[in-house]
Amino acid sequence: MALALTACAGGDGAAPAATDASSSSVEGLTQAPTPTPSPTPTVMSKEQAGAKYLELVAPSNALVAPFNAALEADDVATVRTLCAQSATAYRGFADGLIAAQWPAEVQPAVDRLVTDLAGEISAFATAGASETDDQLWAALNARPAPSGAGQEIRMLLGLGNVPAG
């Protein structure tokens, strides 16, 4: 027991420092005060939520124009590569959406968007890992129709329409 007190006292063998009134002493042993709990996360303001949403969606939005250009050029190898990158970007987007504390009026749309993204992640990951062109197109064509939740979130947060990509 003396080793524990010596370690707590800084290892120099000195007596423990005086305690404040919130500490208690039991038979000569000093008990540390009860730690204060960490604050719980707070819900973002509408402005904070808008900024957070734009931050989270940026990596996947950045892939839209190159993906569409590769489709237009019928560049299947690039489409496949961008599918794998999109799956990763959508996963990061979904994880960020889940981790944030959204305003109550936005949360239901965020929940729907996370569900939409789960389908996108699966489809794009499958397309990105495809070995044949038929597998690639089958995976992309199997994507579920979007619910419109992303656009709803943008409107609820005052962000306007989705930028053209």
Image (cartoon, rainbow, N blue to C red):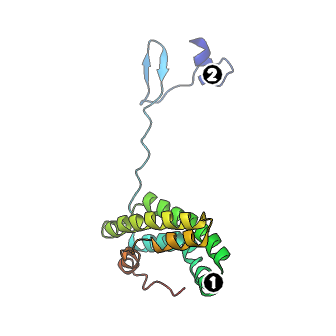
Q: Amino acid at mark 1?
A: Asp
Query: In the image, what residue occupies the spot 34% across and 66% down?
Result: 107
Tag nearer the camera, 1 or 2: 1
Q: Amino acid at mark 2?
A: Ala
Question: Could you tell me if residue 44 is visible in this image?
Answer: no
Where is residue 112? Give x, y as percent. 35, 67
Neighbourhood count class around disc 1 (C-alpha, 10 Å): few under 14, some 14–19, many 20 upward: few
Does residue 77 appear to the left or right of 25 in the view shown?
right
Question: Could you tell me if residue 151 is visible in this image?
Answer: yes
**Badge 1 element:** loop
Q: Which mark is residue 74?
A: 1
Which of these two is toward me, 28 or 102? 102
Verify CB contact (< 8 Å) between mark 1 and mark 2. Answer: no
- Rounded to the nearest whole Å, what is the CA distance between mark 1 and mark 2? 69 Å
Of mark 1 and mark 2, the one earlier in the sequence is 2
Which quadrant would residue 130 be assigned to in this image?
bottom right
Where is residue 63? Give x, y as percent. 59, 76
Query: In the image, what residue occupies the spot 53% across and 74% down?
Result: 137
**Badge 2 element:** helix
* Residue projecting furthest to the right: 12
Q: Which mark is residue 7?
A: 2
Q: Which mark is residue 148?
A: none
Which of these two is toward me, 59 or 35? 59
Query: In the image, what residue occupies the spot 40% across and 71% down?
Result: 144
Neighbourhood count class around disc 2 (C-alpha, 10 Å): few under 14, some 14–19, many 20 upward: few
Which of these two is toward me, 144 or 47? 144
Reply above or below: 32 against 126. Answer: above
Label total for image: 2
